[in-house]
């Protein structure tokens, strides 16, 4: 896992902040377990389970799933305040192996009866083997929008990209809801476009979850490293996505085979 190093510099952070994110986490942890938000007034993320910190020079990333108590991130505060017709999320990830793991989800809160939350948005990896509770194709990248939030696939927008990711290598992923369509970018290039429906929105008052499918319950755990998560209340342009990737990748070391 240490051969491909991510060392995004100040230029990358400047570009992200210039794009006006609603929240931006550089994954700098504090003694209290809160992940600092670079945006004043933005939502803080909490750490659950065991999340490790790995340093690449001056840059620190978070590592998930390498201990007996798999870690994850979640927000206690709900977001956004009102439904969003446009939305973007970008993050750097390095999966340790092919597996079915959730990178980022926006979910409703679990009700008093303990019912599983419903998903409004999800970005996840497909595994090397099928699982009866997941319809994500093998070794794919799946992205979806459910409006209103739901626990099933009926009325779902989005798709899966075959052979959508590499293992043990850093990759820049961007999910975009733009007007009437969904777009997925990997390493600065658009790899999927789907009808998102101009009447479909990201619902309000959702919980942010990273590293697992639900904020409560160990399912579809992400195993690997993650860094530089930003969410926006608007759609990033293709030029912005490309510029962000180039700025982040320019500081990365040349990866070895494994």
Image (spheres, grey):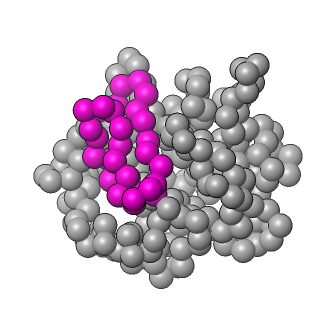
Res 88 quadrant in image: bottom right
Q: Is residue 241 magenta?
A: no
Relative placement, left or right, of 137 versus 215 is right
User: Which quarter of the rendering shows the N terminus?
Assistant: top left
Q: At which x and y percent is residue 215? A: 57, 31
Q: At which x and y percent is residue 249? A: 30, 67
Query: For this rendering, which residue is in front, 240 or 204?
Result: 204
* Stretch in magenta: 23-52
Q: At which x and y percent is residue 155? A: 85, 51
- Give me the residue at 59% from left, 50% from top: 79
Relative placement, left or right, of 254 versus 96 is left
Query: For this rendering, which residue is in front, 88 or 247?
Result: 88
Against 250, is 44 above or below?
above
Against 60, is 21 above or below?
below
- Give me the residue at 23% from left, 40% from top: 54
Res 162 quadrant in image: bottom right
Q: Is residue 29 magenta?
A: yes
User: In the displayed image of the protein, which residue is found farthest to the front?
Assistant: 41
Residue 117 visible somewhere in the drawing: yes
- Give me the residue at 21% from left, 53% from top: 59
Relative placement, left or right, of 72 versus 164 is left
Relative placement, left or right, of 82 versus 57 is right
User: Which quarter of the rendering shows the C terminus?
Assistant: top left
User: In the displayed image of the protein, which residue is found farthest to the right?
Assistant: 154
Q: At which x and y percent is residue 65? A: 40, 29
Query: For this rendering, which residue is in front, 128 or 235?
Result: 235
Res 83 quadrant in image: bottom right
């Amino acid at each position: 896992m240490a051969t491909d190093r991510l060392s995004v510099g100040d230029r990358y952070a400047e570009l992200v902040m210039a794009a006006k994110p609603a929240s931006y986490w550089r994954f700098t942890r504090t003694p209290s377990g809160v992940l600092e938000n670079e945006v004043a007034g933005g939502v803080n993320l909490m750490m659950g389970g065991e999340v490790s910190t790995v340093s690449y020079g001056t840059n620190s990333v978070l590592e998930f799933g390498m201990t007996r108590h798999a870690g994850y991130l979640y927000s206690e505060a709900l977001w956004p305040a009102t439904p969003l017709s446009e939305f973007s999320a970008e993050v750097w990830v390095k999966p340790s192996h092919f597996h079915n793991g959730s990178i980022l989800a926006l979910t409703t809160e679990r009700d008093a009866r303990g019912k599983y939350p419903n998903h409004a948005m999800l970005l996840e990896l497909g595994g090397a083997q099928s699982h009866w509770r997941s319809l994500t194709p093998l070794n794919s990248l799946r992205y979806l929008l459910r409006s209103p939030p739901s626990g099933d696939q009926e009325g779902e927008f989005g798709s899966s990209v075959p052979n959508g990711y590499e293992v043990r290598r850093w990759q820049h992923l961007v999910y975009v809801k733009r007007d009437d369509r969904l777009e997925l970018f990997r390493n600065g290039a658009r790899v999927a476009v789907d009808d998102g429906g101009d009447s479909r929105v990201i619902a309000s008052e959702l919980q942010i979850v990273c590293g697992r499918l639900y904020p409560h319950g160990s399912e579809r755990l992400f195993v690997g490293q993650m860094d530089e998560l930003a969410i926006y209340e608007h759609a990033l342009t293709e030029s912005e996505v490309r510029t962000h990737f180039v700025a982040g990748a320019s500081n990365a070391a040349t990866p070895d085979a494994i």
